[in-house]
Image: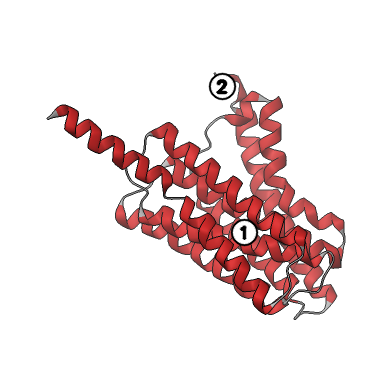
C-alpha cells in the first residue's frame, strides 16, 4: 500500500510541476491573436516568448524543489496574470520600432493589475498561502513595473527606468551584502506601493494626461517605491549584526 501511495504522490507531484506549461501555450496563442489584430515585431515575439518560457521554467523549478502536490487557485490566478505580463512585454518591445495599440496595452495592463488584488485574497480565503506563491506574485509584480517603465521612459526619459529597476537593485545588493537577504517582516504597505506604482505607470502610459501630469504620477510612483525600499533597507541595516 505504501508503494502505491508513493507512486500516486509522485504522479501528483509530476502533474503539478507541469501545470505552469499551460501558461506558455496560452501566452503563445495570445501573442498570435495580438498579431492578427495588431503588429508584433520580431523583437516583440522574442521578448514575449522568452518571458513566458523563463518565468514558467523558474516556477516549475520551484515546484520541483518543494515537491509540491498542489498548484492552488491563487497560483493559478497569478499564472494568468503572468501570462498577461508576457503579452504586455511583447507589445512594449514592439513599441521601440513600430506603433502599437495603446488601448490594447492599457487593457492588458489593467487586467493584470486587477488580478493582483485577487490572488492574495484567494490564497488567504482558501488558506493556501505559501512562500513560493508569495515569491511568484512578487516577481510578476516587479517585472510588470520594469516593462511599463521601459514604455513610459520613451516619452518621459530614461530616468523612469529607476522605477522598474529598484527591486532588482535591492536583490543585487543582497548578493554583495548578505545581511540584506534576511527575511523581512510582513508589511501590507509594500503591496499598496507596488499597486500604486503600477497604476501610476499605466496612467502615464495611456497618454490621456498632459505630459506634466504623467510626469507627476511617475515621480509619485518613484517616491513611494524609494520610501518603501528605503524603510526595508533601514530595518535590515539595524539588524545586520544579528544576521547569520
Cα separation between marks 2 and 1: 37 Å
Residue extending farthest right: 157
Residue 242 image-quadrant placement: top right
Residue 198 image-quadrant placement: bottom right
Circle 1 sits on which residue? 86
Identify the residue at horizontal 66%, vertical 45% (top origin). 229
Residue 118 spot, x, y in % from top left: 44, 63
Give the label on residue 232, or none: none
Residue extending farthest left: 1
Residue 101 spot, x, y in % from top left: 72, 77
For the C terminus, the image quarter is: top right
Q: Is residue 209 above or below residue 60?
A: below
Circle 2 sits on which residue? 243
The answer to whether residue 78 is left or right of residue 148 is: left
Is residue 219 something that shows in the picture? Answer: no
For the N terminus, the image quarter is: top left
Identify the residue at horizontal 68%, vertical 60% (top origin). 89
Dot 1 crowding, Cα within 10 Å, few <14, some 14–19, many 20+: many
Amino acid at each position: 500500500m505504501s508503494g502505491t501511495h508513493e507512486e500516486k504522490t509522485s504522479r501528483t507531484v509530476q502533474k503539478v510541476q507541469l501545470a505552469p506549461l499551460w501558461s506558455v501555450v496560452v501566452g503563445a496563442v495570445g501573442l498570435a491573436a495580438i498579431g492578427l489584430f495588431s503588429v508584433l515585431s520580431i523583437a516583440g515575439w522574442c521578448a514575449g516568448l522568452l518571458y513566458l518560457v523563463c518565468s514558467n521554467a523558474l516556477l516549475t523549478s520551484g515546484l520541483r524543489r518543494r515537491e509540491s502536490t498542489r498548484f492552488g487557485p491563487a497560483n493559478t490566478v497569478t499564472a494568468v496574470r503572468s501570462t498577461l505580463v508576457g503579452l504586455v512585454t511583447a507589445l512594449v518591445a514592439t513599441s521601440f520600432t513600430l506603433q502599437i495599440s495603446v488601448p490594447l496595452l492599457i487593457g492588458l495592463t489593467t487586467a493584470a493589475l486587477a488580478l493582483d488584488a485577487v490572488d492574495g485574497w484567494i490564497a488567504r480565503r482558501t488558506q493556501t498561502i505559501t512562500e513560493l506563491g508569495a515569491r511568484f506574485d512578487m516577481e510578476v509584480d516587479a517585472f510588470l513595473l520594469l516593462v511599463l517603465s521601459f514604455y513610459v521612459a520613451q516619452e518621459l526619459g530614461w530616468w523612469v527606468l529607476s522605477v522598474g529597476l529598484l527591486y532588482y537593485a535591492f536583490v543585487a545588493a543582497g548578493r554583495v551584502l548578505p545581511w540584506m537577504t534576511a527575511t523581512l517582516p510582513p508589511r501590507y504597505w509594500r503591496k499598496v506601493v507596488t499597486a500604486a506604482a503600477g497604476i501610476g505607470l499605466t496612467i502615464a502610459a495611456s497618454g490621456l494626461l498632459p505630459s506634466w501630469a504623467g510626469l507627476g504620477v511617475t515621480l509619485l510612483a518613484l517616491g513611494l517605491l524609494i520610501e518603501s525600499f528605503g524603510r526595508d533597507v533601514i530595518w535590515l541595516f539595524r539588524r545586520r549584526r544579528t544576521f547569520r
